[in-house]
Image (cartoon, coloured by chain):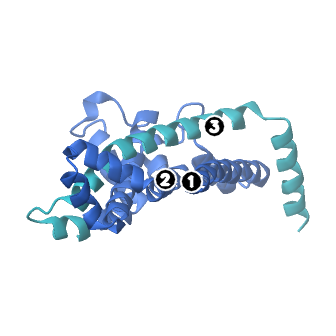
Chain colours: A cyan, B blue
């Protein structure tokens, strides 16, 4: 229990002094996730629309498989 | 294909991307393995099926007569699709949130193709795995709090937009 409490206290100090390494990791995480999400939207929304609106041979297979 | 893709285990996506980008692999000459670009590729592979599937179901929820009416009123294909997207904007925002939620919290694929290299490909999730493994719980807890806060803030912001437009 003692070590968990110490961990929480230390974590609090890392957070309030805005540790530069933690900050850099956070920024990189956000950048990578944002770019990946945007590409997914650019690819996924048109493809999902096609899937919803057009009937073509293999639609069911394409959607479910 | 899409629905299975939505349940794609991150480690499988990571393995596929790693095989392709490996130095001796088909795309090895691009030197992308263990770069942020490799992580983006793997995460896109995970999130794109989620966005595709949720977009398809969002548009299928709309009344099919709306399409016929739009086309009957003389809308072009493009105008028709654009109107359907506007009509389905709330579930489309949910698709965005689901996609982002999948990539920000994902750890397996990022670890495999990114390599958790300090200052280069170390992400919140991969850093938490490493610090926990080292028994360095203080930093792991701090990073987890940041990860939760980031995920919460982004979803809070998008939900605010979603509900705001709803009124």
Mark 3, mark 1: which one is toward the viewer?
1
**Considering only vertical position in the picture, is B27 above or below B13?**
above
Residues under numbered marks 3 and 1 in contact, where contact means CB atoms less than 8 Å apart:
no
Question: Subunit of mark 1?
Answer: B
Give B120 or B146, whichever is nearer the viewer.
B146
Q: CA distance from mark 3 to mark 1?
A: 29 Å
* Residue B16 relative to residue B120: left or right: left
Residue where numbered disc 1 is placed: B162
Task: Identify the image quadrant of the C terminus of chain B.
Answer: bottom right
Give the crowd class for mark 2: few <14, some 14-19, many >=20 residues within 10 Å.
some
Q: Tag 2 or tag 1, which sits nearer the N-term?
A: 2
Residue where numbered disc 3 is placed: A25
Both labels 1 and 2 in a single chain: yes
* Numbered tag placed on residue B93 in the rendering: 2
In the figure, is residue B39 to the left or right of B163? Answer: left
What kind of element bears circle 3?
A: helix
Residue B114 coordinates in the image, percent (x, y): 46, 41
Q: Which residue lies at the image location 33% right of the left edge and 29% below the top edge?
A: B31
- Residue B121 visible (yes or no): yes
Between residues B19 and A54, which one lies in front from this camera angle? A54
Q: Quadrant of residue A41?
A: top left
């Amino acid at each position: 229990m003692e070590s968990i409490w110490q961990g929480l206290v230390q974590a609090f100090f890392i957070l309030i002094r805005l540790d530069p390494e933690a900050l850099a990791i956070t920024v990189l995480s956000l950048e990578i996730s944002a770019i990946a999400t945007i590409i997914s939207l650019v690819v996924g929304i048109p493809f999902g629309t096609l899937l919803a609106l057009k009937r073509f041979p293999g639609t069911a297979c394409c959607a479910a498989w | 294909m899409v629905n299975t893709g939505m349940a794609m285990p991150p480690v499988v996506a990571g393995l596929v991307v790693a095989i392709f980008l490996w130095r001796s692999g088909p795309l090895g000459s691009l030197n992308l393995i263990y770069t942020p670009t490799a992580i983006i590729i793997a995460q896109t592979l995970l999130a794109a099926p989620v966005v595709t599937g949720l977009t398809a179901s969002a548009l299928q929820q709309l009344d099919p007569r709306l399409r016929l009416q739009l086309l009957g009123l003389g809308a072009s294909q493009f105008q028709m699709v654009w109107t359907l997207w506007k009509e389905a904007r709330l579930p489309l925002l949910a698709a965005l949130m689901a996609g982002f939620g999948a990539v920000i919290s994902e750890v397996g694929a990022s670890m495999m193709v990114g390599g958790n290299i300090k200052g280069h490909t170390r992400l919140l999730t991969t850093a938490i795995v490493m610090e926990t493994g080292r028994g360095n719980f203080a930093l792991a807890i701090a990073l987890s709090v940041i990860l939760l806060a980031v995920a919460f803030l982004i979803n809070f912001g998008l939900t605010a937009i979603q509900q705001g437009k709803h009124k």
